[in-house]
Every structure is written in structure tokens, then in C-alpha cells.
Image (tube, rainbow, N blue to C red):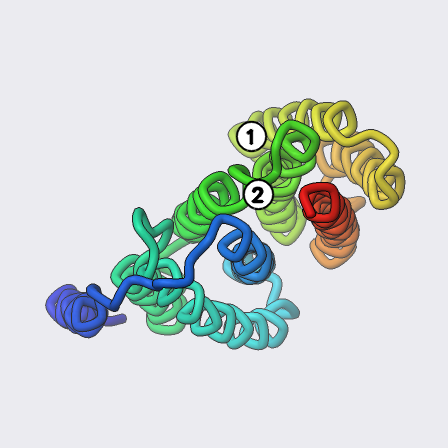
């Protein structure tokens, strides 16, 4: 495990390198419409990183709980997370050319350092980190990225989305990502419980809360964006997962393997991401129609 001084040196180095690029020239051709179009790609990259972090969290938490079958896919997902972080360099650079950047290279470098420190802890002393601490540290990273997602959407896309696209935008950058995160945490907690064959009282309470919150967010998304193509398949998957969780995992973990539960939860979460894509496509259509009307 990395020593505290070494970790601090790595963090300081990352920060120092990022600060070198803190003052790029402001973009002279920036416009609300152009910023919005670029922001769609930025939001896609941020959501991809969230997705990868959530998967790694679930796999690593189940692995720490004793299921060795998750080690190989966990390490493959770790490489995907690093790639997704590096892909955000373009986003951070572009944001820093605008007034009031939603994400800076300093912030991205800090997240990268925290991610690498977590990976080093998992490799160096997995018994010391524990499943609960692992879940918490992953969730903090996800929370940071979700904050960037909301900032980019609200500052770059909302000004040109108008009232006709506000529901789609809110569902795409806020409601559905929050729903995916509730189920992502439930996947990690439930996979760990299934791997151990025991669901503790604290885990039961957490899973019940996550399930309740997920249902609320699902209904909110349906109300804000009715009749989207991805909504029905996703809601069916979510309802199936919550039923499986309540009847099997909370009832008797010896009837549910970690691999089965992880697969079911992943199918539901992937359906939510497909729902997000439907939101994005519909929102792009709204903005295109607005451009035609304005022209």
C-alpha cells in the first residue's frame, strides 16, 4: 500500500501539472449554440466515466467480499475507467477556455489521483480497505463526476433548450443518472451480501432505502419524459430487479449468487443508460427544431 507521504507527493505532482494549464486563452468564437453542441459530447463522456466507475465499484466490492470470479473483469474495467478519465482531458481543456468552467484540469487531475490511490489500496492491501470503505470511496468519485455532468448540462445546454426541452434535459443529466446511481450502489451492496451469503441488518436497511429511492426517481422520469422509446424496457428491468432484490436477496442470500445478482442489476442499469440515450436523442431533436424555426 502506498505510504501517506508518497500519496501526497503524487497528489501534489498532479495538481502542479494541472496548474500549468490553468489559464488558456479564452475562445473567441464561443457561442451558446456552439457550446451546447460541444456539451452533448462532454456529457456523453462524463456518463461513460460514471458507468465505468459504477461497474468497477460493484465488481471490486463483490471481490472484496470473497468472490474471486470478479477479479479478472474488475481489472479489465479498471483499465476502462482510466481511459475514460483521460478522455475527459478534452472536455476540461475546452471548459477552461470558457467563462465559469464546469470542470478544470486541476479537478480532473485530482480525481485521477484519488482513483489511482484507490486502485493502489485495492492492489496493496485489499483486506485493510474493506468492502464498505471501497463502496464509499467509489461513490464519492461518482458523485464528483455527476456534479460535473449537471454543471455542464445546466450551464451549456439549458440556456438554449428553452421550456420545450427542459424536462428532457433534467431527466438526461439529473433524474436518470441519479436513478442509475441508486441501482449502482444497490448492485455493489447486494453483490457483496450475495458473495458472503449473509445480508446484514445494515445492508438490508440500505438496500430498502435504495430500492425506495430508485422507484421514486423512476416515476419522476416517466412523468417528465413520457413515451420515450427507452422508458418501457428500462422500467420493466428495474421492476424485475427490485422484485428479485426483495424476494430473494433480502429474503435469503443463499438462493442468490453474486454473479446472478450482478448480472440482473447490470441489465437494469444498462437499460437506464439506454433510456438516457433516448433522452439525449429527443433533446437533440428539440434543439434542431428550434434552430430551424429560428432560421
Residue at 67% from the left image edge and 35% from the top image edge: 165
Which of the pair 282/45 is nearer the observer? 282
State the image quarter where residue 118 is shown. Answer: bottom left
Which of the pair 154/46 is nearer the observer? 154
* Residue 37 horizontal/vertical position (percent): 58, 57
* Residue 271 horizontal/vertical position (percent): 78, 49
Comparing labels 1 and 2, the label whose residue is closer to the camera = 2
Mark 1–mark 2 CB contact (< 8 Å):
yes
Left or right of 133? Residue 266 is: right
Which of the pair 98/290 is nearer the observer? 290
Residue at 43% from the left image edge and 48% from the top image edge: 148
Q: Which residue is mark 2?
A: 185
Instruction: Determine the secondary structure under disc 2.
Output: helix
* Residue 292 horizontal/vertical position (percent): 74, 48
Q: Is residue 122 above or below residue 100?
A: below
Left or right of 260? Residue 126 is: left
Q: Is residue 215 above or below residue 149?
A: above
Q: Which residue is mark 1?
A: 206
Which of disc 2 and disc 1 is earlier in sequence?
A: 2
Residue at 71% from the left image edge and 54% from the top image edge: 262
Q: Is residue 261 visible?
A: no
Few, some or many residues within 10 Å of mark 1 (<14, 14–19, 20+):
some
Residue at 32% from the left image edge and 61% from the top image edge: 97
Left or right of 163? Residue 97 is: left
State the image quarter where residue 244 is shown. Answer: top right
Q: Is residue 232 above or below residue 42?
A: above
* Residue 144 horizontal/vertical position (percent): 40, 48
Amino acid at each position: 500500500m502506498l505510504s501517506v507521504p508518497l500519496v501526497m507527493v503524487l497528489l501534489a505532482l498532479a495538481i502542479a501539472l494541472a496548474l500549468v494549464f490553468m489559464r488558456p486563452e479564452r475562445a473567441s468564437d464561443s457561442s451558446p449554440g456552439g457550446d451546447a453542441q460541444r456539451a452533448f459530447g462532454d456529457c456523453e463522456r462524463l456518463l461513460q466515466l460514471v458507468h465505468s466507475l459504477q461497474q468497477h465499484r460493484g465488481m471490486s466490492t463483490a471481490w472484496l467480499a470473497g468472490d474471486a470470479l470478479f477479479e479478472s473483469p474488475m481489472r479489465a474495467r479498471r483499465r476502462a475507467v482510466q481511459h475514460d478519465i483521460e478522455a475527459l482531458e478534452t472536455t476540461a481543456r475546452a471548459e477552461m477556455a470558457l467563462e465559469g468552467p464546469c470542470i478544470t484540469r486541476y479537478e480532473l487531475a485530482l480525481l485521477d489521483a484519488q482513483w489511482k490511490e484507490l486502485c493502489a489500496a485495492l492492489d496493496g492491501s485489499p483486506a485493510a480497505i474493506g468492502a464498505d470503505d471501497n463502496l464509499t470511496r467509489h461513490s464519492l468519485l461518482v458523485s464528483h463526476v455527476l456534479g460535473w455532468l449537471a454543471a455542464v448540462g445546466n450551464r451549456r445546454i439549458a440556456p438554449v433548450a428553452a421550456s420545450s426541452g427542459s424536462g428532457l434535459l433534467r431527466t438526461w443529466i439529473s433524474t436518470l443518472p441519479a436513478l442509475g446511481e441508486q441501482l449502482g450502489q444497490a448492485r455493489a451492496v447486494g453483490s457483496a451480501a450475495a458473495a458472503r451469503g449473509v445480508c446484514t441488518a445494515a445492508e438490508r436497511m440500505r438496500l430498502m432505502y435504495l430500492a425506495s429511492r430508485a422507484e421514486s426517481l423512476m416515476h419522476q422520469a416517466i412523468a417528465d419524459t413520457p413515451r420515450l422509446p427507452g422508458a418501457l424496457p428500462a422500467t420493466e428491468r428495474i421492476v424485475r430487479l427490485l422484485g428479485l432484490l426483495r424476494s430473494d436477496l433480502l429474503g435469503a442470500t443463499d438462493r442468490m449468487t453474486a454473479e446472478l445478482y450482478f448480472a440482473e442489476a447490470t441489465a437494469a442499469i444498462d437499460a437506464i443508460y439506454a433510456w438516457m440515450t433516448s433522452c439525449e436523442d429527443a433533446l437533440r431533436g428539440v434543439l434542431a427544431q428550434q434552430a430551424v424555426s429560428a432560421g
